[in-house]
């Protein structure tokens, strides 16, 4: 009978473990860290990785070693030693994994509780997700709205999610935090940005036709730049209708689905808004009324060639709606 | 018993009811007109109700599709094929046709195209049908990998892409992995426990024929207006409540596939509990039987939940109920709770039979008893129980009560313990064995190594903070494929190669089998391993378009996936050519101890011409003089002699 050599096995295990460690360390597995919450996530990630490398080396070395050492020729018809089990070793490989997963659970639990807790000078942002755009409202700053998430550096932010139609999910890989927006339910997420920059906001829950395009940016700015932006936005909304309309267009994420030259929008999911007059004629309605209806009740008339029920109704404040309608009717030729 | 005198390859003179005209005889012609007739009845039912209620429009196609096309017509098809003939005759009091079982084994190819009550025929029907759906699902993957090779849109539009992804997953899960295991189990379980057939042969035939119905339904969704269902195989409400008509083809397809699963599971349970050969105690059952016993418990307990969730979604759509629609007082997350209460156990439904296959193959090919047999069986039971307490780990970012995440994390982690026991026991079985690297053994060992990677990435996903970062990303895609492709599919291949000689009576080509393994193994790893990185770095799943920085890896993955797809050609060629012209297989080419190898290949009609008497454990390799079973024809006194030794 061929005996296995434990020394050779351990040596092979060390080699596999070293190779796996190199793969773990050389490949940039995680995106750049741009939020406090990521520290805890990264800690759990690397702790788990260390344990997994150990287990993988063990399993990999036993299989590889057996492949080389215990292989017999096809015509060899002898049997192996009749070993049925070993109570001690079975207890061992029940207990050790149990201890390891308990350790991972404990650390995860601590990090989770920490990451759920908003900081002291916490700021609130309401997030409305709809097919296929994000709207961020700042209740602490005159209810400003924006289609991009702008955040001041170093301040903890609690995002409150709502969904207008179906379930969406908010994710910024650099922040490591993710949360579904569920219709009819409030959900929350805490983020404390630690690095200035522009990061992708990605919808990660399949939400229909335009899911892959439901993207925007999270922009982390210095507190001074953030305040300046808040001020400028406040002024833009009080500007003459044409310009205010452009702000409303941008803030409601119309550009993610529609093309509209005056706003520099090139979305392809929904109808081309530069052709609005032609569409109104097709629908047999006066332009202004048609545009208003299409925003408030989009399914009343859907331009042929586009699926019904994709665009959700937008219930904008009356002044913003008028500004938007005027922007759309004057901008389209 | 006279079964031994029947030659399996000679057609009988006259099948029952041969004197009837083809129009009335159970078969494909009757199925064709009865499908049309039942569709008409369904249509009439809808019209009568709508006319009576004064509803407008009278012809509402979404309702007609659900009632006539997806419910009534399949019943007509099954009835026409003859699935209900015996029960109908019995119910109306007309004389039933005696089924002495010897009249319909797999004599000619025609016997495979009708409801056939022989579990060996049904097993082959299952395996062949599921492989067809596997190929269909694989081709869909090839199309969307072509689309994903470069960022931006090239070949398909968004709706088609989402449809391809959804139908791919639905076919692979509901029409391939689950029923492929049911098919292998169908073939070998009665043989392994020493039974002549399953407990309910007619139910067995019906449960097979529900499958093509379900699969055809899902494929058919591509041709309805609006395209195939495009909400992923998870089909979350409320998105699914408000989609083009194709969605109901998923809602109903799952019902037919689920009904098939439940019937088969009931059949397995009753067969295993009541039809074991004398001496076959639970603790002498092969681990494959244990695995299917556990799986069947999971199926009968869990599957009704997915049936319910899909009915609710469909009711929201067709009957304007508000189970999951918040505007009407519904609870959107409720869908996910019900869905995952099935679909997490479903992961084990798709894995435990594979554990069983791996145990059979590894023990036989390493020529050693399975290490820690009892703990292996008990860990299956532990997974069964724990499997029902972890469903919310799919919902850590979904908005569940925050406190719920901690206990669900702990239970999910704890499942690693019984799973670890199984992996370590397989390793200990190989250790110092006399290892034969046949194709089934390569797939079994490939399974152990790939499944370990899938299990370890599962630990990452169970740890809530990491899961929050990677859920709904390509990390999850990588994980699920390491578990379901590296896990389930590798064991299905192991099982098909292992029992191919028993099922067909011929040997497959070993060199092609090994080529198939290595192509699969390499293609699989190059395709799926980089997806872990894509996920942690920021690529979400189920998107047709992605950030340009992921372009290179996606191109590499697509090329590898085409190579992986090509490996199936080797497999199919090997199977088809070997089945037709392979070397004749002897009864027991692997020198295995379990009962299915103690009879001829393929087995006689009633499986055992002599009743086996089980006298010992099924994996006593290397134990001098050990026997798993003796047959009546063996010399007198042997039973007592062997029993005394244990």
Image: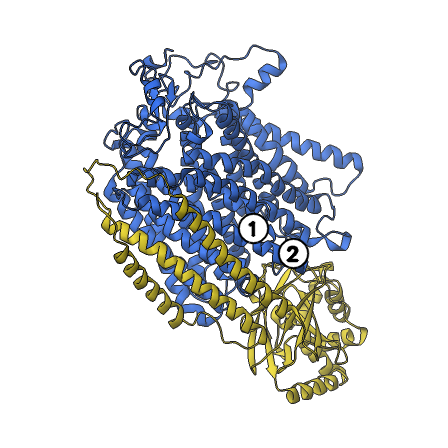
Chain colours: A yellow, B blue
Crowdedness of circle 2 by 10 Å Cα count: few (<14), some, many (20+)? few
| Visible residue check, residue B351 | yes
Rendered position, A263 above or below B131? below
Query: What is the secondary structure assignment of the residue under circle 2?
Result: helix
Q: Which residue does the numbered mark 1 point to in the structure image? A: B227
The residue closer to the viewer here, B245 or B300, is B300
Relative to residue B339, is residue B603 depicted above or below?
above
Disc 1 is placed on an element classified as loop
Residue B546 x, y percent position in the rendering: 49, 67
Spot occupied by residue B57 in the image (x, y as percentages of width and height): 74, 43
Instruction: Note whether A296 is above or below A76 in the view shown.
Output: below
Q: Chain of mark 1?
A: B
- Image-based side of A273 in relation to A45, left or right: right
Residue B281: percent from the left, percent from the top? 45, 27
Lower position in the chain sequence, tag 1 or tag 2 = 1
**Residue drawn at the location 76% of the way across and 69% of the way down:** A292
- Closest to the observer: B124 or A158? A158
Disc 2: host chain: B
- Of all residues, the one furthest to the front in this rendering is A88
- B46 lies above or below B195: below
Reading the image, the residue beneath label 2 is B404
The residue drawn where x is 61% and y is 46% is B341
């Amino acid at each position: 009978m061929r005996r296995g050599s434990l020394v050779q096995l351990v040596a092979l295990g060390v080699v596999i473990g070293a190779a796996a460690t190199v793969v773990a360390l050389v490949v940039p597995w995680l995106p750049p860290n741009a939020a406090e919450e990521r520290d805890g996530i990264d800690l759990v990630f690397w702790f788990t990785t260390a344990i997994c490398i150990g287990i993988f080396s063990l399993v990999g070395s036993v299989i590889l070693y057996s492949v080389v050492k215990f292989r017999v020729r096809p015509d060899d018809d002898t049997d192996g030693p009749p070993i049925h089990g070993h109570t001690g070793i079975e207890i061992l490989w029940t207990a050790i994994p149990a201890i390891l997963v308990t350790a991972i659970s404990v650390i995860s639990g601590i990090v989770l509780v920490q990451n759920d807790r908003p900081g002291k000078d916490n700021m609130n942002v309401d997030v409305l997700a709809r097919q296929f755009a994000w709207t961020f409202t700042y209740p602490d700053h005159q209810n400003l709205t924006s289609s991009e998430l702008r955040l001041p550096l170093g301040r903890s932010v609690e995002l409150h999610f709502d969904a207008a139609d179906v379930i969406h999910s908010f994710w910024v890989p650099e922040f490591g935090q993710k949360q579904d927006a569920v219709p009819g339910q409030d959900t929350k997420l805490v983020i404390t940005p630690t690095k200035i920059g522009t990061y992708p906001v990605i919808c990660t829950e399949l939400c229909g036709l335009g899911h892959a395009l439901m993207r925007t940016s999270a922009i982390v700015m210095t507190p001074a730049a953030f305040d300046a932006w808040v001020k400028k936005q406040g002024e833009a909304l009080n500007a003459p209708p044409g310009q205010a309309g452009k702000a409303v267009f941008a803030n409601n994420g119309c550009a993610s689905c529609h093309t509209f030259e005056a706003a520099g929008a090139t979305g392809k999911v929904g109808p081309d808004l530069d052709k609005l007059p032609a569409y109104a004629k097709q629908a047999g309605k006066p332009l202004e009324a048609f545009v208003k209806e299409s925003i408030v009740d989009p399914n009343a008339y859907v331009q042929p060639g586009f699926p019904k029920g994709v665009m959700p109704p937008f219930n904008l404040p009356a002044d913003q709606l008028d500004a938007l309608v005027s922007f759309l009717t004057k901008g389209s030729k | 018993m006279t079964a031994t005198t029947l030659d399996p390859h000679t057609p009988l003179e006259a099948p029952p009811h041969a004197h009837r005209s083809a129009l009335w005889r159970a078969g494909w012609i009757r199925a064709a007109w009865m499908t049309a007739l039942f569709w008409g009845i369904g249509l009439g039912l809808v019209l009568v109700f709508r006319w009576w209620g004064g509803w407008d429009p009278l012809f509402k196609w979404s309702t007609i599709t659900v009632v006539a096309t997806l419910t009534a017509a399949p019943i007509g098809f099954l009835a026409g094929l003859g699935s209900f003939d015996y029960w109908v005759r019995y119910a109306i009091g007309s004389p039933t046709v005696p089924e002495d079982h010897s009249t319909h084994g797999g004599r000619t190819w025609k016997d495979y195209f009708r409801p056939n009550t022989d579990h060996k025929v049904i097993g082959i029907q299952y395996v062949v049908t599921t492989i067809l759906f596997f190929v269909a699902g694989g081709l869909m993957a090839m199309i969307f990998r072509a689309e994903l090779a470069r960022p931006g849109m090239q070949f398909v539009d968004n709706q088609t892409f989402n449809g391809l992804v959804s139908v791919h997953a639905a076919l692979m899960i509901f029409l391939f992995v689950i029923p492929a295991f049911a098919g292998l189990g169908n073939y070998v379980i009665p043989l392994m426990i020493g039974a002549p057939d399953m407990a309910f042969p007619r139910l067995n035939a019906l449960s097979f024929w529900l499958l093509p119905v379900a699969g055809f339904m899902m494929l058919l969704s591509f041709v309805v207006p609006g395209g195939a269902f495009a909400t992923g195989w998870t089909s979350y409400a409320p998105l699914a409540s408000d989609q083009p008509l194709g969605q109901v083809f998923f809602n109903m397809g799952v019902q037919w596939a689920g009904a098939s699963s439940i019937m088969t599971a009931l059949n397995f349970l009753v067969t295993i509990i009541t039809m074991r050969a004398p001496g076959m105690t639970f603790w002498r059952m092969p681990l494959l039987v244990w695995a299917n016993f556990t799986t069947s418990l999971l199926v009968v307990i869990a599957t009704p939940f997915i049936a319910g969730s899909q009915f609710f979604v469909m009711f929201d759509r067709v009957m304007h109920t508000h189970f999951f629609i918040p505007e009407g007082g519904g609870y959107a997350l409720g869908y996910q709770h019900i869905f995952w209460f099935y679909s997490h156990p479903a992961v084990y439904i798709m894995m435990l039979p594979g554990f069983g296959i791996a145990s059979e193959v590894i023990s036989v090919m390493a020529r050693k008893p399975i290490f820690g047999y009892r703990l292996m069986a008990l860990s299956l039971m532990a997974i069964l129980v724990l499997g029902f307490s972890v469903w919310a780990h799919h919902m850590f970012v979904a908005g569940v009560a925050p406190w719920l995440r901690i206990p669900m994390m702990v239970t999910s982690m704890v499942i690693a313990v019984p799973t670890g026991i199984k992996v370590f026991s397989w390793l200990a079985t190989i250790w110092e064995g006399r290892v034969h690297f046949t194709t089934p053994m390569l797939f079994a060992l490939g399974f152990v190594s790939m499944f370990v990677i899938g299990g370890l990435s599962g630990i990452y996903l169970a740890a809530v903070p990491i899961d929050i970062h990677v859920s709904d990303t390509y990390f999850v895609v990588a994980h699920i494929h390491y578990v379901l492709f590296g896990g389930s599919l590798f064991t299905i291949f192991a099982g098909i190669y292992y029992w191919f000689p028993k099922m067909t009576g011929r040997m497959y080509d070993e060199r092609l089998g090994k080529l198939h393994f290595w192509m699969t193994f390499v293609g699989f790893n190059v395709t799926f391993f980089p997806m872990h990185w894509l996920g942690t770095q920021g690529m979400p799943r189920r998107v047709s378009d992605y950030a340009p920085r992921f372009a290179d890896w996606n191109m590499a993955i697509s090329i590898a996936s085409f190579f992986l797809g090509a490996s199936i050609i080797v497999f199919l060629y090997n199977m088809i050519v070997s089945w037709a012209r392979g070397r004749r297989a002897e009864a027991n080419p692997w020198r295995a101890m379990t009962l299915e190898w103690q009879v001829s290949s393929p087995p006689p009609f009633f499986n055992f011409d002599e009743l086996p008497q089980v006298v010992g454990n099924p994996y006593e390799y290397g134990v001098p003089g050990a026997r798993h079973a003796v047959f009546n024809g063996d010399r007198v006194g042997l039973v007592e002699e062997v029993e005394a030794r244990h």
